[in-house]
Amino acid sequence: MPKSPQEVSVAEKRLIRAGFREEGHVRLLYGAKVLVPLLLCVLVPISGVTRQLSPFYAYVLALALGYLAPDFWLGRRIKQRQTNIRLGLPDCLDLMVVCIEAGLSLDQALSRTADEMQASQPELSDELRLVILEQRAGRPRMDAWKNLAERVNLEVVRTLVSSIVQADQFGTSIAKTLRVYSDGLRTRRRQQVEEMAAKTAIKLVFPLVFFIFPSLFVVALGPSILVLQDSFEKYFK
């Protein structure tokens, strides 16, 4: 059962966003911050780094990298999980719309969607199961959805939760709200892809100028320069 956001520390929040929710994971994180620097210090004399650096700087660098390495790994894990959730959200909303229009309530549609997406989107399915678990434990529905937005820490999820809260308060159609939001997500993703494609031409300028053009100049002008060099040598002789 996840705690409220006010009861969770910074390290626990990052671990929860990465998918690690057990209390022992916090101890593992802090233990890694101690063991990884010690392991790197042991590897310093074995790897021969002290031949290029002084021993003092080598050990300081090993301690710093070892202390920051778990945080870097955790940050990459959070970004990867957020990316998977963002990519799977439109399909999740479409499946929820189908379930709601088939006569299921929002909670039943959420449970069915979590079961159906277990194989294709395990991260998103896991988060939806937590929402269901919180509601079964007695937490209000809107609080459970707001906790989902806090755990995932994605703007698209925050906006979705706000739309669901407003639809629940004003009595509007949940299915229509989810369908409109799903279409908006796909449109936004298409626009992002088009924007990235438009930026490709500008990004290719630097490789062309620094890597491809010099090679072309050498291939095109190299023989001419050699011929001119031979001609000047004969002339000056």
Image (spheres, rainbow, N blue to C red):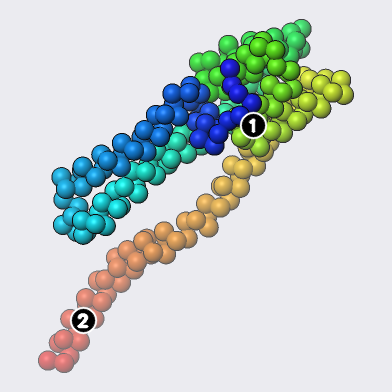
Reading the image, the residue beneath label 2 is: 229
Tag 2: Cα neighbours inside 10 Å, few (<14), some, or many (≥20)? few
- Helix, strand or loop status at disc 2: helix
Q: Quadrant of residue 180?
A: top right
Is 228 positioned to the left or the right of 12 in the image?
left
Query: On the picture, is 57 further left or further right than 47?
Result: right
Q: Which residue is at a point 36% across and 61% down the rendered structure image?
A: 211
Under circle 1, the secondary element is helix
For the C terminus, the image quarter is bottom left
Residue 129 percent location from the top left of the image: 60, 16
The image shows residue 160 at horizontal and vertical percentages of 71, 29
The residue to which callout 1 is attached is 6
Q: Amino acid at mark 1?
A: Gln
For the residue pair 170 and 90, the one nearer the viewer reads as 170
Q: For the point 87% across and 24% down, which residue is it?
A: 170
Which callout, 2 or 1, points at the residue further toward the start of the chain?
Answer: 1
Res. 121 visible in picture: no
